[in-house]
Amino acid sequence: MQQVAGAPYEHLEKIKSRDEYKVRVGHYRIIVSLKNPEREVHVLTIRHRRNAYKD
């Protein structure tokens, strides 16, 4: 996550239907939001990829 915080747009992939981004880590997805794209990355959830996008 330190790499993401340093340069968020290089490591994050936009989730199409949401105003959120994802980071892939093996079989897991870290769903984040950017409050201030230059400074703040808020982790919303960490889930297995099979369940990551279910609300």
Image (cartoon, rainbow, N blue to C red):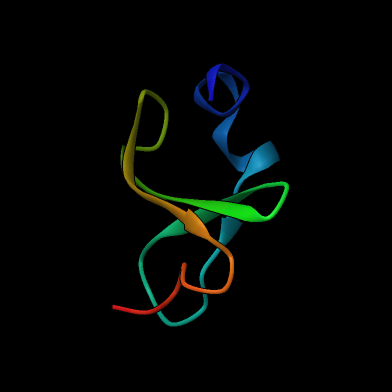
Q: Residue at x 54, y 55 (%)?
A: 22
In the picture shown, does residue 41 fall above or below 46?
above
Q: Residue at x 47, y 67 (%)?
A: 52
* Quadrant location of the C terminus in the rendered image: bottom left
Percent x, y of residue 12: 60, 47
Could you say which is closer to the camera, residue 32 or residue 25?
25
Given residues 27 and 34, the one toward you in this image is 27
- Residue 11 pos. (x, y %): 67, 40
**Horizontally, is 10 left or right of 50 in the view?**
right
Q: Residue at x 69, y 38 (%)?
A: 10
The answer to which of 22 and 7 lies nearer the viewer is 22
Image: 49 above or below 8: below
29 left or right, relative to 27:
left
Q: Residue 41, position in %: x, y?
A: 37, 33
The residue at the point 57 percent across, 74 percent down is 50
Q: Up-down: is 54 above or below 35? A: below
Q: Count of labels shown?
A: 0
The one of 4 and 47 positioned closer to us in this rendering: 47
48 up-or-down from 41: above or below: below
The picture places residue 34, in percent across and down from the top left corner, at 35, 43
Q: Is residue 8 left or right of residue 36?
A: right
Image quarter of residue 6? top right
